[in-house]
Image (cartoon, grey):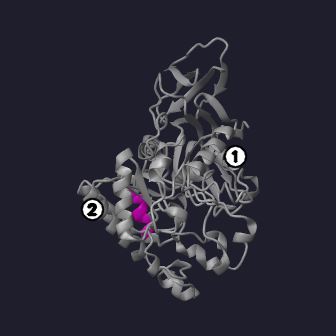
Amino acid sequence: MTTYLIKGARPLGGDPADILVKDGRIAAIGDSLDATGAEVVEAAGLIALPGLVDLHTHLREPGREDAETVETGSRAAALGGFTAVHAMANTDPVADTAGVVEQVWRLGQEAGLVDVVPVGAVTVGLKGERLAELGAMADSAARVRVFSDDGHCVADPALMRRALEYVKAFDGVVAQHAEEPRLTVGAQMHEGDRSAKLGLTGWPAAAEEAIIARDVLLAEHVGARLHVCHVSTAGSVDILRWAKSRGVQVTAEVTPHHLLLTDACAESYDPVFKVNPPLRTDADVEALRAGLADGTIDAVGTDHAPHAVEDKESEWAQARPGMLGLEQALSVVIETMVEPGRLDWAGVADRMSVRPAAIGRLDGHGRPLAPGEPANLLLLDPTARAAVDPAALASRSRNSPYAGRELPGRVVATFLRGVPTVLDGKAQK
């Protein structure tokens, strides 16, 4: 295995230091390190962060390889600075058995660009009728610890309670897509003044908040871990803050697009801005940023949702919801949280690496940049700015909501256990 000497990087934005990477681990950090025979990576001015961890990635394989594969999604993740991603269960066939989650896990190992961690479905076929093989998936080679019907809410409270009780046996977590389905029939965008003006059926904030309120009470009752996917409203942040104050074992994520974009985007009727949950109001965006800053929201989860051209380039009502997120996630966090002073680089590492790794129970990720630790890290040029070109993205799909938008920051290198998956801004496989 090649030894690398990363010269002059700034760990967590601190003072410049050399980082020696050897045998998959950080061997030393200090001034003017000498490593004869090491490959030198010049990193003056670059920020060193632990490799990012995404709790919410749609890789589409098996079933929709026309939109994304484990390999192409892994490449996009590495280019975004990620060293681990959780692959959601809404594939075809659904990842609701040990066989399917092991298939996804092995595809991730073959790609070798990031650690692909399968998420198991909570219910068979995502139908919300009976529990999937949670124990078998947990005991499989994939060692599943996160379970989600994402794309669908586990709407039956009795079933949700049983799922929360079941995963306690192996320290698992249920990641809920919080959407009361009876309140969102035919919904196309956030319910409010704009939806009325545009003539699009509204998706009320209460549909999300009602499920979160119910589920934190269930989690408290059974003493289980609950994770809330893609939080999008100010009311949801308030409920989470209250639940945490009571000691409920609840964590939550926010997407990059909900930190940056609002329901005003729908005025263009461009389906690239159609997403579930929908883009919300300026007030919601402000509450989400505040919640991420104070730790009420634990993590940034991309909800990377690639779609084939025919599924997005259509009339708004017929278009499928979802946006690309892996390659621009860190840039959006820089723009919305770092540049305004709401998070420092240590805070970025905490919300995008440390906490999501802890929630997913991932060993070796989200670790300190310190000697002896696995060399999962990224190098970032914080001064770079560039307009997003969807055609240049690694994903098989092009449905980026940031097309043409200039965003800050560029991932120069990503290392997975000491092996560069990205170097000089280019994927290595």
Residue 211 % position (x, y): 38, 70
Q: Earlier in the sequence, mark 1 or mark 2?
A: 1
Whether residue 319 is situated above or below residue 348 in the rendered picture: below
Q: Quadrant of the N terminus?
A: top right
Residue span colored magenta: 284-291
Q: Quadrant of the C terminus?
A: top right
Helix, strand or loop at label 2? It is: helix
* Image quadrant in which you'd find residue 275: bottom right
Q: Is residue 393 left or right of residue 52?
A: right
Extreme residue in the top direction: 36
Residue sitting at x 25%, y 60% = 221
Q: Is residue 286 magenta?
A: yes
* Amino acid at the residue labelled 2: Trp
- Is residue 238 among what the camera can see? no
Q: Position of residue 402 (x, y in %)?
A: 64, 61
Check if residue 19 falls in the magenta segment: no
Q: Nearer the viewer, residue 38 or 301?
A: 301
* Spatial CA span between label 1 and label 2: 40 Å
Amino acid bearing label 1: Glu
- The majority secondary structure of the magenta stretch comes to helix
Q: Which residue is mark 1?
A: 71
Residue 251, horizontal then vertical, whole percent: 38, 54
| Picture coordinates of residue 54, whole percent (x, y) | 53, 49
Closest to the observer, 108 or 81: 108
Q: For mark 1, does the 10 Å Cα neighbourhood hold few (<14), some (14 to 19), or many (20 or more) residues?
A: many
- Residue 242, numbered circle: 2
